Amino acid sequence: MNIRGSICALVTPFTADGALDLPAFGRLLDYQIAGGTEAVVVAGSTGEAHMLDHHEYEQLLSYAVERVAKRIPVLAGTGEAATSKTVALTRRARELGADAALVVAPYYVRPTQEGLRRHFLEVAEQGGLPVVLYNVPSRTGCDVLPATVAGLREHPGIIGIKEAVGSDERIRAISELVRPDFVYLTGDDGTACKAMLGGAAGVISVVANLVPKAFRAFCDAATRGDKMAAERHNAGLMPLIEALNCAPNPIAVKAGLPSLGLGTAGLRLPLVELEDGPDRARILAALAGLASLADAA
């Protein structure tokens, strides 16, 4: 499965009264495909997966699979704190038509490296979908170390990793594990240029929700090793990437949706909307700046 390049970790739009906004989600999917996004993640952390009930999760994933219609891969977020629940959700995602599972390290419970190894192997053995590991210690409270990843990649059902640790040391360590059947995808927009020039095959991105065309051009340059062009694109994107750091994801990225006609900025508690003020203004100014650059190109 060719999962690489510009991959969007989709937000989940809600209506003003807090219900799933599937029409807005459809517009977001169309916007991504028109902008050149090469795969999408449904119900990941950016998609507020843990704010969705079982029925909503199924609605959202089914809708995405139908709307995308095999034009690009659809990855389903299926990671839970318990291995048994992760296996069950991965099986259900397969039934609903997902192409692969993005499986975050078990959060809150803080497993050992051996526990992580056994967890991911069980999901790969029993879940029925190709597995992309997802390491994001800032959210989970545990770190899937490169030595553990090196062992896990030997399983044919584990096809890659989304690595959100963007340090130079981690980028080098994970890049060394790349091979034809195991892909390295960075999960950090801010260090994506460095990661792709260092060996990552793409990015599972937050900012791509708002600017898929610009982000695809950036990824194309970086993954072909064009350092000058990649750094130029990265410089153009950086004001927006930095603006989105003003609040925990996906609060800030959702603040940009209304201006693009892609839904409300609404979230579900305990997340709350970004208030009107300097942070929201900075996001909208960065979006406008990128639009001006695109018009001038």
Image (spheres, grey):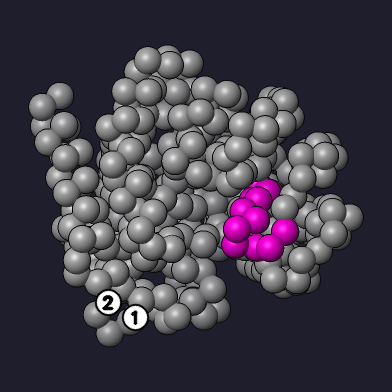
Q: Residues within 10 Å of mark 2 (few under 14, many from 20)?
A: some
Coordinates of residue 214 in the picture (x, y in percent): 29, 34
Which quadrant holds residue 222? top left
Q: Name the residue under label 2.
A: 15
The answer to whether 8 appears left or right of 236 in the picture is right
Q: Which quarter of the rendered picture does the N terminus lie within?
A: top right
The disc placed on residue 283 is none
- Disc 1/disc 2 C-alpha distance (Å): 5 Å
The answer to the question of whether label 1 and label 2 lie on touching residues, with beta carbons closer than 8 A, is: yes
- At mark 2, the secondary structure is loop
The disc placed on residue 19 is 1
Q: Nearer the viewer, residue 6 or 190?
A: 190
Q: Which of 97 and 14 is in front in this view?
A: 14
Coordinates of residue 142 in the picture (x, y in percent): 72, 59
Which quadrant holds residue 212? top left
Give the residue type at disc 1. Ala
Coordinates of residue 3 in the picture (x, y in percent): 55, 37
- At mark 1, the secondary structure is loop
The answer to whether 132 appears left or right of 148 in the picture is left
Farthest residue, direction bottom: 17
Q: Residues within 10 Å of mark 1 (few under 14, many from 20)?
A: some
- Magenta stretch: includes residue 166: no
The answer to whether 102 appears left or right of 14 in the picture is right
Q: Give the range drawn in magenta.
A: 131-142
Say above or below: 182 vs 161: above
Q: Which quarter of the rendered picture does the C terminus lie within?
A: top left
Q: Residue at x 38, y 39 (%)?
A: 37
Q: Residue at x 76, y 39 (%)?
A: 146
Say above or below: 54 vs 156: below
Give the residue type at disc 2. Thr
Q: Which of 169 and 34 is in front in this view?
A: 169
